[in-house]
Amino acid sequence: DQNFPVLGMNEIHVVEAGDIVFVDHPKYYDKALQSAATIVLINKKVDCPEGKALLISDDPFRDFNILTKHFRPFQGTNVSIALSATIGEGTVIQPNCFIGNNVTIGKNCLIHPNVTIYDHTVIGDNVMIHAGTILGADAFYYKKRPEGFDQLISGGRVVIEDNVGIGALCTIDKGVTGDTTIGEGTKLDNQVHVGHDTVIGKKCLIASQTGIAGCVVIEDEVTIWGQVGTTSGITIGAKAVIMGQTGVTKSVEGGKSYFGTPIEESREKLKQMANI
């Protein structure tokens, strides 16, 4: 039906018009039904919102995995640089790297030894990636069942824009079915982790041992100092500064400095500590 397009699939925090989304917990029924998704895969018979379709399933998590495997099946390879990879002019790839299927790397990049770039990753021009970094591992996303944890299969990508610098031993997980994005000109220190479907804006600085959860939005020109951790699904506003060892437990406005756990404006937090 041309008036009812299905253009993709995504998880609930980053779903867009035309997507299939799944929901299997009462906590998220309303969010899924009121989301931009066109089709909702759900385990309860409910009234169908206008402009949407419902797929009733006894196990939406399982069936979402079936769809992911159908549209993005695993492809093995027996070479270090897949034949389907595209590598731009002037790009240097050092020994012992792995470049997966359908990877695109732009011009004048430098990929240092032992970097692993999973399938479908997109890398722009003038990007530097230091040794041991891994782009495109699966999302840390599980459903607890009586027999153990069932993994949500990841079918998304990592997208690295132009002029990005990524330090050694960083890990950037691919989206569940969308993109994990590092914006133009952003620089990551060594040992930074970026979770699935997170979008980092342009010209950000992120220091070592920072852990960014899934589905986070970090706007342009944010500075994050060392050993910061975030919860999932939050937004850090443009030009915010997050001081070292802060726990970002909620969304914060841009243009301010923050510190502590739970997070507060740094001026207020430091006043509290001085009073103690």
Image (tube, rainbow, N blue to C red):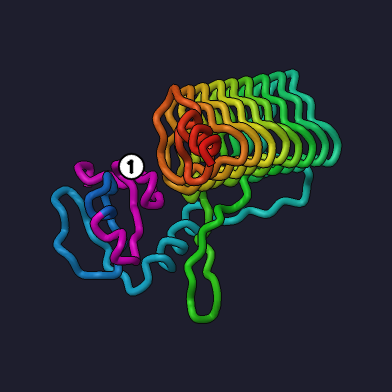
> 108 left or right of 36?
right
Foreground of the two, 18 or 238: 238
Magenta stretch bounds: 1-30
Q: Is residue 15 magenta?
A: yes
Which residue occupies 42% across, 45% down? 233
What is the crowding at mark 1: few (fewer than 14 residues within 10 Å), some, or many (at least 20)? Answer: some
Among the 4 quarters of the image, the one containing residue 36 = top left
Query: Measured along the vertical axis of the image, is residue 152 above or below residue 248?
Result: below
Q: In the rendered image, which quarter contains the C terminus?
A: top right
Residue at far right of view: 95
Q: Residue 150, percent across and down?
A: 52, 69
Residue 45 appears in the picture as rendered: yes
Which residue occupies 55% across, 46% down? 195
> 72 left or right of 78?
left
Q: Residue 143, percent across and down?
A: 47, 67
Q: Which residue is mark 1?
A: 16
Residue 82 appears in the picture as rendered: no
Residue at far bottom of view: 146
Among the 4 quarters of the image, the one containing residue 99 = top right
Q: Is residue 22 magenta?
A: yes
Q: Residue 149, percent across and down?
A: 54, 71
